[in-house]
Amino acid sequence: MTKPDQYGHSRLRSLCSVALLAPALRLIPAQTARLAGDACWLSILAAVPAILLDIWFLSAFMKCRAPGEGMSELLARAMGPAAGGAAAGAFSLWLLFYCGFILRSGADRFISTVYPSSRPWVFSAVMLFLGLLAALGPEKTVSGTATVFRPLLFWVLGLVLVLAFTTASAKNLTPVTVSDALPVLKGAVPVLDVTGSVLTNVCFLEGGTEKEPRRFSAWAQWLILPAAFMLALCAATVGNFGGGLTATMNYPFFAMIRNVRIFRSVERIEALVVALWVAPDYILVSMLLIIASRTLMKLAGYVPREGMKLTSMANGRYIIWLCVLAAGAVSLFLAPDAFTLKFLSEKVIPGLNMALIFVLLPLCFAAGKLRKTI
């Protein structure tokens, strides 16, 4: 088991905030606009009750844990060693697949916005190497890095959005009528997908913290800033481009910041924002590799230990390298073209993700309650 209280709950919430940024910018402006049109900014508000319900469910689940236990141990207790291990293994394999997808989509973002003549494997390889170093080191390092980057990222992105609003048109955001209700609810699905994903993933790391007495309240308060950011992101993007044009773009946020200028100067700030975007990709990739590798190490009978040399293969640490190779292979062969990448991003990845976190996980919880093992 992980040593309790090596993270701290505030660090885990910072980790969640930074990890959320990469998938949010990939899906929220464009995908919500495709589903809800000009009213997509309301989809953020529509998703909040469902996200709060998810926080309540996860808090009820994590309330059952013993000291040092995370989600993988809880699944084993809830379902029994065999079925619980299979469920934890399914999550681990999914996270490795998702990690490979994040590497590939992150590379595509850099190529599309800044380096059009580059090859995606270069960016994937660099990010995967950084993730490998993080996975080989102490788990608390990644949450500490996220704590450092979180205020910088949100201040810079907040500034960008404020400046973007200066060129936005209210006509693109209104009027909203009753006929928009169903599209708005559909647009809430990607918001629930990306937020529910990080909220679930962080539960696998909670073995490194003491039990939080008022977990639901703390995470509900955490939701305020990410929800406000996603709301501002949708409103600023659609306010500048309109829902129809936003829906046709692959990366509407980056298209928008090309027109943002500081104090009416001609210098663009897109290079700064893109450079800062390395941090969320790094945090998310590292988080996924740590969760997947540690879970698979436990399933193989090893007890992950801190303070070992980076090159050590003892105590099952070879599994970390296998996880990195698996994620790298996925990123290399997953999407040979932009059409496939878009299809995976909008259909396959969200579908599989939501099936695991909103179907499999509640079934495991119900089984544990019926078996009276949690």
Image: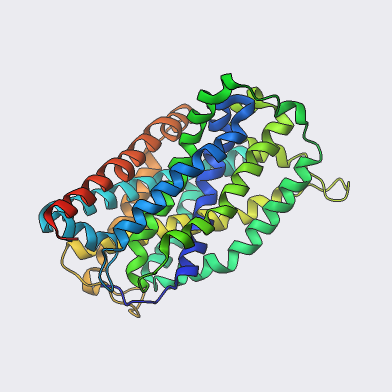
Image x and y of residue 3, in percent: 32, 77
Q: Is residue 311 above or below residue 78?
A: below
Q: Is residue 292 above or below residue 350?
A: below
x 18%, y 54%: residue: 369
For this rendering, which residue is in front, 188 or 254?
Answer: 188
Q: Image check: 216 left or right of 70?
A: right
Image x and y of residue 201, in percent: 37, 55
Farthest right residue in view: 264
According to the image, what is the colour scheme of the structure?
Answer: rainbow
Q: Quadrant of the N terminus?
A: bottom left
Image x and y of residue 341, in percent: 45, 33
Is residue 296 visible to the viewer in this orientation of the structure?
A: no
* Image mark count: 0
Q: Is residue 5 above or below residue 57?
A: below
For this rendering, which residue is in front, 61 or 296?
Answer: 61
Q: Image check: 128 left or right of 119?
A: left
Farthest top residue in view: 179
x 25%, y 44%: residue: 360
x 53%, y 53%: residue: 223
Q: Image check: 137 left or right of 254?
A: left
Image x and y of residue 222, in percent: 53, 58
Residue 65, picture quadrant: bottom left
For this rendering, which residue is in front, 371 or 354?
Answer: 371
Q: Quadrant of the C terminus?
A: bottom left
Is residue 227 visible to the viewer in this orientation of the structure?
A: yes
x 58%, y 23%: residue: 180
